[in-house]
């Protein structure tokens, strides 16, 4: 089928998502993908921070083949061995005691919000239902999670929005302290705002959040959907701050592209879910959790978080050098591990398009930030090549 026809049908039969790029991808291997015309790209989007092990990873493919033949789906009325093993592995390598599996990031956050409210009502008082989240954050597109996403552009047209959500500026402990009251159930925050622009808070912010939540007797919910699974150079981003949340949500990279979400919590919080409190048809099914087990196992065995830290430093150094050479085009470069943001002077959409023409796929974030979230298996040669392409793209736009 020719690409033009395909894109026409896309325009005609799909509900609009964002403005899609005029490219249809059909094959991937490692850090590379190919489109319908056979053109090769370096994929520094990682499917929006999803494909941590790269495309067509042999262990992921192997697990999918095996599990598809063995058992795809049964429902959560039965014990699912892969789900149990993945929950145990997640708990062995985190603060958590228990896990609830779902199918996406938004669902993992919905679960976190429900769990937090139920815990707060049972332990703090029946008035406690408010969730405080941070301006510029992103938590998903369902009605509750889009409401927790404190950005007007995502709310417009969907009113009435569910109640019980309050917002404060990111990286502002004083504002949070003022906002917490007798109705607060918990605080929901990304340790680094991903979609919001790769916004990295001050070093004292997460410890400060932990302290405020402890003093108020409310839950700290960390949304590590983008920052988790080694992306920032530690398995969980909150490890950089030396604190632990009460609840943590995961999704994106957990099964390298097979849809999955996970809500992790301490025993103290998790025990308020009793039979019938919450449920899911697909969540934690044998396929998704078998792949999750392979992904987390591989991340740990191959020490990919450390690799992300090392490659992230390399990528940042190269980008800083690029900025030094084109300071009028690049305002700032920042990142942790392989979650990197580049604040641009020219419109980021033009830069993304110019990169794509030259064979590099990158993401946007925030107002005018180019975002990179390549697979954690990326090599120095590919990272260097990506920065060269960004340089060429900026050079072409300057002329
Ligand atoms: C992507 C993302 C979500 C939403 O995940 P979906 O799987 O798209 O529902 C939530 N929170 C953060 C921090 C994310 O990056």
Image (cartoon, grey):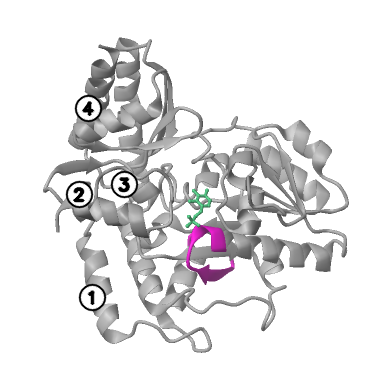
Select label 1 or label 4 by which is in front. 4
Select label 3 or label 1 by which is in front. 1
Gap in angstroms between the C-alphas marked 3 and 4: 19 Å
The residue identified by callout 2 is 4
Which residue is rendered at x = 39% and y = 48% of the image? 49
Considering the numbered disc 2 on the image, is that residue within a helix, a strand or a loop? helix
Where is 292 relative to 23, above or below?
below
Image coordinates of residue 18 in percent, x first then y, are 43, 46
Count neighbours of disc 2 (C-alpha within 10 A) and say few if under 14, some if 14 to 19, many if 20 or more: few
Image coordinates of residue 231 in percent, x first then y, are 41, 46
Gap in angstroms between the C-alphas marked 1 and 4: 36 Å
Count neighbours of disc 4 (C-alpha within 10 A) and say few if under 14, some if 14 to 19, many if 20 or more: some
- Which residue range is magenta in the image? 93-107
Callout 3 touching callout 4 (CB < 8 Å): no
Image coordinates of residue 157 in percent, x first then y, are 63, 48
The residue identified by callout 3 is 376
User: Position of 266 compared to 230: left or right?
Assistant: right
Q: Does residue 323 appear in this view?
A: yes
Task: For the C terminus, give its image quadrant.
Answer: top left
Callout 2 touching callout 3 (CB < 8 Å): no
Considering the numbered disc 4 on the image, is that residue within a helix, a strand or a loop? helix
- Kindly indicate the quadrant of the structure image that contains residue 59: bottom left
User: Position of 220 compared to 393: left or right?
Assistant: right
Where is 132 relative to 65, above or below?
above
Which residue is rendered at x = 85% and y = 53% of the image? 183
Q: Earlier in the sequence, mark 1 or mark 2?
A: 2
Where is 88 relative to 57, above or below?
below
């Amino acid at each position: 089928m020719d690409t033009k026809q395909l894109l026409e049908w896309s325009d005609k039969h799909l509900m609009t998502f964002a403005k899609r790029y005029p490219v249809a991808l059909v094959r991937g291997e490692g850090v590379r993908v190919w489109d319908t015309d056979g053109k090769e790209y370096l994929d520094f989007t990682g499917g929006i921070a999803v494909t941590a092990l790269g495309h067509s990873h042999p262990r992921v493919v192997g697990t999918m083949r095996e599990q598809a033949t063995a058992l795809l789906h049964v429902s959560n009325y039965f014990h699912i061995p892969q789900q149990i093993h993945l929950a145990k592995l997640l708990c062995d390598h985190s603060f958590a005691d228990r896990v609830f599996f779902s199918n996406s990031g938004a669902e993992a956050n919905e679960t976190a919000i429900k769990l937090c409210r139920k815990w707060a009502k049972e332990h703090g008082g029946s008035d406690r239902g408010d969730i405080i989240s941070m301006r510029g954050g992103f938590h998903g597109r369902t009605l509750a999670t889009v409401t927790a996403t404190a950005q007007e552009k995502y709310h417009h047209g969907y009113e009435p929005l569910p109640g019980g959500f309050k917002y404060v500026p990111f990286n502002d402990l004083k504002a949070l302290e003022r906002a917490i009251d007798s109705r607060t159930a918990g605080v929901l925050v990304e340790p680094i705002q991903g979609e919001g622009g790769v916004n990295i808070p001050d070093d004292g912010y997460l410890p400060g959040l932990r302290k405020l939540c402890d003093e108020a007797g409310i839950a700290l919910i960390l949304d590590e959907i983008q920052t988790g699974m080694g992306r920032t150079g530690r398995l969980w981003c909150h490890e950089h701050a030396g604190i632990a949340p009460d609840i943590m949500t995961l999704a994106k990279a957990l099964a390298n592209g097979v849809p999955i979400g996970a809500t992790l919590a301490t025993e103290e919080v998790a025990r308020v879910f009793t039979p019938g409190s919450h449920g899911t048809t697909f969540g934690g099914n044998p396929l998704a959790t078998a792949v999750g087990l392979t992904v987390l196992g591989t991340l740990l065995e191959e020490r990919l978080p450390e690799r992300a830290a090392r490659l992230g430093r390399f990528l940042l150094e190269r980008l800083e050098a690029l900025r030094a050479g084109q300071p009028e085009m690049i305002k700032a470069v920042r990142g942790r591990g392989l979650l990197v943001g580049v604040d641009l002077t020219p419109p980021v959409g033009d830069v993304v398009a110019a990169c794509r023409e030259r064979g590099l796929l990158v993401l946007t974030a925030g107002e005018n930030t180019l975002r990179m979230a390549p697979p954690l298996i990326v090599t120095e040669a590919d990272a260097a090549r990506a920065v060269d392409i960004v340089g060429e793209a900026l050079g072409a736009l300057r002329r």
